[in-house]
Image (cartoon, helix red, strand yellow):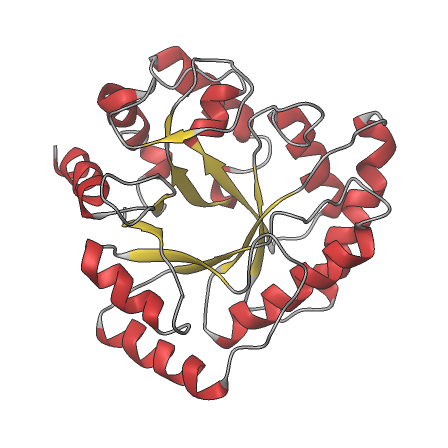
Amino acid sequence: MKIGGHVSTAGGLNVAIDNAVKIGAEAIQIFASSPRSWNFSEPKEEDVSLFLEKANKFAISPVFLHGVYLVNLGNAVLLEKSINSLTQHMLVASSIHAKGVIFHCGSRKGFEFEEVLPQIADAIKEVLRSTPDDVSLIFENSAGMGSSIGSNFEEIEAIFSNVNNNRLGLCLDTQHCYASGYDLTKDEGVDLLISQIKPIGIEKILAVHANDSKVPFDAGVDRHENIGEGFIGIKGFEKIMAVEELSEVPFILEVPGFGKVRGPDEENVNRLKKIRLD
């Protein structure tokens, strides 16, 4: 099990590796563009080369990209932009030898899940059809806010079944799981989570977003906290990281951090590494 974090690419794609080394990350997640904008610029060839060189030198792997927050496959108005954005990110992922692109599916506001399911499945199929076979599109479970898609694994299983492509992977966000009704502080909560993923396929889990929760159990709100400082706590992460099925899955931090620079830091990385050792 590798421990990593979401790191900044400010100053160039390759700078992400420098930032990973500073905090002791063994794997990373990055944005290829601003997460709050549809604007997109291809990374420069020399930056990609330097990124690959540094990643190899410091053995930073796997690498994941995270799609922009605007992506919404449940909204017909935003569908074309969402497909284009995911496709662009998948092409970058291939160029930097990343595992794939993690994305939020979006919201079904005003519709039942069954009504938007065909649209979601067709959009995912289009992205996979338009991108190289060496990268995965990785669905992240949601925290259950409003009419968000994929906060329960029955919905996620339906999407995976309709897409039926082995390049569609799964990212588990611990805070989202906890906020949407899976109590990861208890053995039975962890067992329930794993049992509901099994019909999808445990092997589909390509990454875990390791985040403590700023909000109580089943709150239905996406609010991340530093490891051990939230409602999941160290004991909860001890249970999660002891799950045999997750032993080879990278744990990627998306926490606020303890220092002045916001985001995953050495302290959070070390807390997970300590649990891994114990």
Residue for point 50% across, 22% down: 195
Q: Nearer the viewer, residue 98 or 179?
A: 179
The image quadrant where one finds the C terminus is top left
In the drawing, does residue 51 fall left or right of residue 149? left
115 shown above or below 209: above
Q: Image quarter for residue 22?
A: bottom left
Residue lying farthest to the front in this orientation: 260
Q: Whole-percent x and y of residue 18? A: 26, 68
| Nearer to us in this view, 202 or 155 | 155
* Residue at the far bottom in the pictured view: 46
| Tally of numbered discs | 0
Q: Is residue 83 left or right of residue 101?
A: right
Question: How far across and down, in percent of the image, does residue 178 sit?
Answer: 45, 21
Q: Nearer the viewer, residue 198 or 65?
A: 65
Q: Residue 87 placed where, x, y %?
A: 68, 64
Residue 86 percent coordinates (x, y): 66, 59
The quadrant in which residue 277 appears is top left
Q: Is residue 67 left or right of residue 29?
A: right
Note whether 206 is above or below 228 in the view shown.
below
Q: Is residue 231 above or below residue 177?
A: above
Residue plotted at (43% across, 18% down): 215
